[in-house]
Amino acid sequence: MDNNQIARVAHEVNAAYCAALGDFSQTTWESAPEWQRQSALLGVSLHINNPAAGPEASHISWMSQKVAEGWVYGVEKNAELKTHPCIVSFSQLPREQQAKDYIFRAVVHALRDA
């Protein structure tokens, strides 16, 4: 599987997990904005190139990208205002948000050699 395919699966798994939590803001891969696809691809590259990188590294990478693009902490996720409640340290994330990083990493590792 190539990185695009892995990113697509990881994105869809994340969207399903978010829906299970009552968050229906995640669209399908085909409908996802380009910034969201690029974010998934960067996460895939992180774990492909650094197999020992853990879930916290995934969050740090994601957050660094967001901050570089002008995103800031906000109580609610708002792509227009570039605010996101997960722009905090990994240890400050609620467990269900930390779980997304564990799941993302697991999907990448499971599919990397498929």
Image (tube, rainbow, N blue to C red):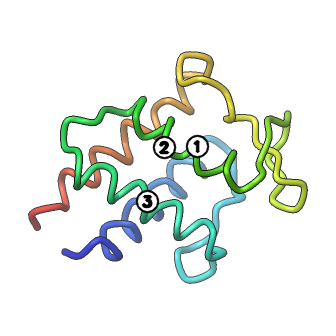
The span from disc 1 to disc 2 (Cα, nearest Å) is 5 Å
Q: Residue type at mark 1? A: Ser
Q: Residue furthest bottom?
A: 30
Q: Which residue is mark 1?
A: 64
Q: Residue type at mark 2? A: Ser
Secondary structure, mark 2, is: helix
Q: Quadrant of residue 84?
A: top right
Q: Residue type at mark 3? A: Leu
Residue beneath the point at 88% across and 62% down: 80
Q: Which residue is mark 2?
A: 61
Q: Residue furthest front?
A: 68
**Quadrant where the image shows the N terminus:** bottom left
Secondary structure, mark 1, is: helix
The span from disc 3 to disc 1 (Cα, nearest Å) is 11 Å
Q: Is residue 95 above or below residue 112?
A: above
Residue beneath the point at 29% across and 71% down: 3
Residue beneath the point at 51% across and 48% down: 17
The span from disc 3 to disc 2 (Cα, nearest Å) is 8 Å
Counting from the top left corner in percent of width and height, residue 91 is at 54, 16
Q: Are marks 1 and 2 in contact (CB under 8 Å)?
A: yes
Q: Which residue is mark 3?
A: 42
Residue beneath the point at 50% across and 37% down: 59
